[in-house]
Image: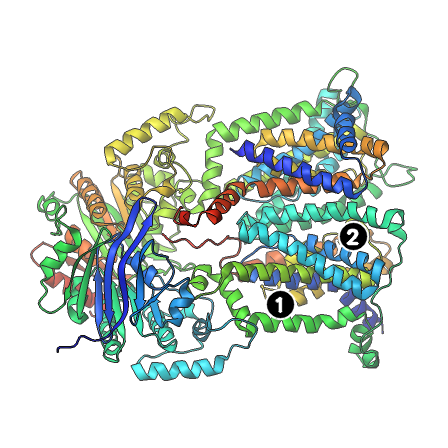
Amino acid sequence: MNVLPMIRLEAKDLTVKYGDFLANDRVNLALRAGEVHAVLGENGAGKSTLMNVLIGLQQPSGGHLERDGREVRFAGPQDATTARIGMVHQHSMLVEQLSVVDNVALGLERGLGRVPLKRLSAELSAIADQYGFEVDPWAEVSTLSPGERQRVEILKLLHRQAEVLILDEPTSVLAPQEVRPLLHALRRLADGGRSVVLITHKLAEVAEVADCITVLRAGRVVLQRPMQGADATELAHCMVGSEAQAKPQTEGSEIRVPFGEPVIAYEGVKVAAAAGRAPLEGVDLTVRAGEIVGVAGVDGNGQQALADCLAGLSSVTQGRLALHGQDVRKLSVRVRRQLGLAYIPEDRHHTGLVLDLSVADNLRLHDYRRRPWASLLGRLNRKGILAAGREAMQAHDIRARSASQQARWLSGGNQQKIVLARELTGAARAIVVSQPCKGLDLLSTRAVHDALQAQRRKGAGVLYISTELEHLLDQCDRIAVLSRGRIVGEVHCTGHNRADAHARIGELMAGAK
Amino acid sequence: MTAVRIVMGLALALFLGSGLILLGDGNVLAVYQALLVGAFGDQHGWDAVLIKACPILLASLAVALPLRLALFNLGGEGQIAMGGLFATVVGLQMEQASPVVAIAACVIAGSIGGALWASIAAAMKVMRGVNEVISTLLLNYVAAAVLSWAVSGPLMAPDAPYPYSQELPDSTWLPSAFEGWGAHAGIWLAIGLAVTLQWVYSQGSVGMSARIVAMSPQTARYSGLSPTRQTLGTFALAGACAGLAGAFEVIGVKYQLFQSFVGSFGYDGVIAAMLGAAQPAAAAVASIFLAGLKVGANAMQRATGLSVSLVEALQGVIILCITISAAFPVIRLTWLRLRQPQLKEAV
Amino acid sequence: MVIDEFTATALRLSVPVAFAAMGGVISERAGVYHVALEGAMIAGCFGAALGAFHGGPMAGLAAGMLAGALVGALLALMTVTLRLPQIVCGISVNLLVIGLTAYLSRIVFGGQANTLQLEGLVEPWLPALADVPLLGPAFFAQPPLLTALPLIAFAAWWWLNRTHSGLALRAVGEAPRCADANGIAVQRSRWTAVVVASVCAALGGCFIVLCQVFLFSEHMTAGKGFIALAAVILGRWSIWGAVIAAVFFGGFDALQLKLQFTRPDLPYQLFVALPYIAALLALVGLMGRSRAPGAVGQPYQRSTR
């Protein structure tokens, strides 16, 4: 084909600066009609910032945008919508307490006019039929699955007649069997003349559906080319750069320590459902000393409950839960910690740290009431706490302005390092980690995995809960699959059967026996 | 930093207050002078100030302590009432007791009364999540009704022309703060309490625990802290402080229980706590300042003819300005940003 | 007829709380706690008295609503624009308005404040309907603001649940980030909500002055603004629910007055405390089952990182 399809939206020399930090550095991006354009990059590479500029949530410090060849400025998301550009965010932008129609109507018009709910619902159903989606316009969004919510968001963009659709990590919330249909839908949308942008860090998806690729690293475009003929390894190298190769970590897993006593044991554990948290319906799982056991599964199948009940943050309604063989159901968090429990929670902002306290204070969260951190009368030993904080920052490579800086201002990776430093002490024997690498770049992920391997070599048992299958396959000896509150199967990982293990786990997650 | 903006807030309040005075055809200087001199000019003024400052100080502690947990105890009025009631009931039994025993009994009874009343709202909060702003306020009205019934019924003094209780035996009467002064010794206990609590909350691990629970309840739970225990304990302590105020009013000032003895102390405590940014020591200073305003108000009315409600208005202006002063850094930043658009990427 | 009289009294006593509660719902659905309903109400009282004093009842109504709007603007400035903690702001605004109105009323009305006889809004609206059985005396033979209450409530309900700006307001209260991403002006929506809410509460104050007591006295609202907050919760953050809850409290208030006369053997304080105890019990009973708007109490700032 001699003539390239028309450019719908183009970013020219786009730069976004936060103070001294360059989130985007002279980025050039051309989005053409009928194409699926994949934007690849590690966490923190600048993809989200770039997209925020494209949809008007962020103003560029330099460069400009062109829509159909004409320069445009978006003062806010409304301008982008008017320009027929829409985005499906990684974290759903639907208002949960409103119905599907309400959400589609949101932002459509201003003023005191009546919201034409019936008409909108008819229009919505028509579009849904056209693309083979199924949707109940009157359902409250909180009752929909992540996959369904995604479809609603796409439908909303189509209803607004979007010509450029941007999707940010859309498959991160989907079960493996939902990924294919989504990618096919994106292909259909592109074939219909739209320009589709897919932001992802998963190379496999890119290969399936993309027409061309842009790789971002540290805010700059390091590669831009058609998909045809691209090499996966080359792409992977581009994403992470030369300082950190993207090879799977196998050093730690070669050293085999004979597995010891069970340190964590779930026996028929049931936990009740709570707000936003799925229940456990009878879990049997054991972790022995020196072992890393992974728990795979799509988010929302009971992972939070699994971690919470062991950490003592939620109660077990049935079954037995043991640490080193001792039933801990009635024991407080403090006692469990004495038994060697360590917990790296998924929500490091609200469960792992107190953001408004200093780095030093966060490190002392569990023991500030005991000597030597507090005197007999209860007076805090501030000097000692600060000194210990400085030491820990050195020892664990925690980057912050000082030990008294508030944890809020540190990067995600450094915040996680505080949690690791505090939890993974010499006394840790039974370690639960939940989604520890969420939002972290490669180096920080490395640091987390190194720390876990070190603990394992020391003889601790680790329960590693994650939705990132790749990480689990790299790090774990054994992976259990959690589905609808139960363990539906386990797969052993020897390092040689990776592809088979991957497939088997996918089957188990999809509900196969 | 905080001190600077509070001073700026006070300055703004003084400025706006002057406007109010002018509105009433008053002489600004004369009014402020009368207030100041009337309150702090002589022993008589100081005496009156100390008497008023004691309940306000204790009431401010009752607000400040839960405020550190981001909880709002607006039930000072009811807790003071209950404290006074309990102290009166016990005090009336202390005819034969020695002063030490009698006073201790009344003090303890008053504290328990206030603590119990505050705990009702705390229990509602932890068990059912009832917003404590509303529950403490509603409980004020219930307490007022209970007090009214007690004073016009079982406790009423025989032959009383309007409801008040029998007089308490003199074994329960508090000694003076200074030899020959009218103010009672309760002010010492109040100040001591403020200083102790200030130390405990800023230097002690208790303060750290409160901060953690207030900032991040989930993390607090994982640290072994219990937001429930903290809420219940803090409210009980707060109620005890308010109850103490009630007890002191009865055994230190009037020696009888009057239906309207609480007056505005509850809300004055709220103002003092907010002025002191929930720091017990600062709240204590604010309490003395507020007491001074009240004492000065009468002198001001005599001297300038302006009604005492001006002081109520001034109080409102002061608290508003102090609250707004918390935004001064933001206002300054926004103003700078408006004048220099290229600074937009900052923070 | 006794029932009619009781109903009539109950309805009359509910009006101020009902207006304030409607305001509370509007504000909280947009994500802003409005603890200053009491202040807005008393501002309405003062404005109504001032306006009626100088220009008659309609002027009083207008002035009362304006006063409420001013209070709302102050609260909105502090909570929405300056993003100060909402409850602290509400308490401060309350204290300011209560103190200010006490002082200003001395200046404006001088010594005659307590003996004022303002011209009120008493003539029933649609008097022809006053003879309708059941509803007539209780509802139509009442001051116009009472009869207008359901209409105003309907307008508020329609706005909140059927219009674009109401939908935007609800989204802002549940998930401001999502609303923002949809192009909704979060700050403006909240400002509108707070000001409208304050005007509603002020209407309650206007009713007290122009339809009930015809004068202004300090602290005349006696905590109705706070009972309104309870009504908001009991009404599960819906307009009609809050109005019904307000009528519930009004009913208890009327009951209390009646019982004082019919049961003189019981201490009257028991009856005085009755509405408040009922409110507390209702809060305990119903609290677990309803949900406040998702983002209420949290100031919103568009963060770009």
Q: Chain of mark 1?
A: C
Q: In the rendered structure, the residue with mark 2 lies on which chain? A: C
Image coordinates of residue A317 in percent, x first then y, are: 39, 55
Q: Amino acid at mark 2?
A: Met
Marks 2 and 1, the one that precedes in the sequence: 2
Q: Secondary structure at mark 1?
A: helix
Residue A331 pos. (x, y %): 38, 43
Q: Nearer the viewer, residue B34 or A174?
A: B34
Give the quadrant of residue A206: bottom left
Give left or right: position of A348 versus A395.
right
Q: Which residue is mark 1?
A: C239
Q: Tell me if residue A161 comes above or below residue B58 in the rendering.
A: below
Which amino acid type corresponds to the residue marked 1 in the rendered image?
A: Ile
Q: Residues within 10 Å of mark 1 (few under 14, many from 20)?
A: many
Decide: is C245 above or below C138: above
- The residue that disc 2 covers is C220
Q: Residue at x 32, y 84 (%)?
A: A130
Q: From the viewer's perspective, is B276 left or right of C95? A: left
Crowd tier of the residue under label 2, counting other residues whose Cα lies within 10 Å: few below 14, some 14–19, many 20 or above: some
Q: Say whether mark 1 and mark 2 are on the same chain.
A: yes
* Numbered label attached to residue C42: none
Vertical order, B222 against C47 (above or below): above
Asked whether the residues under the numbered discs 2 and 1 touch, taking CB atoms below 8 Å apart as contact, a structural biologist would say no
Towards the viewer: B298 or A238 = A238
**Foreground residue among A412 and B38:** B38
Residue at disc 2, secondary structure: loop
Q: Is residue B164 visible?
A: yes
Question: Is residue B166 among the parts visible in the rendering?
Answer: no
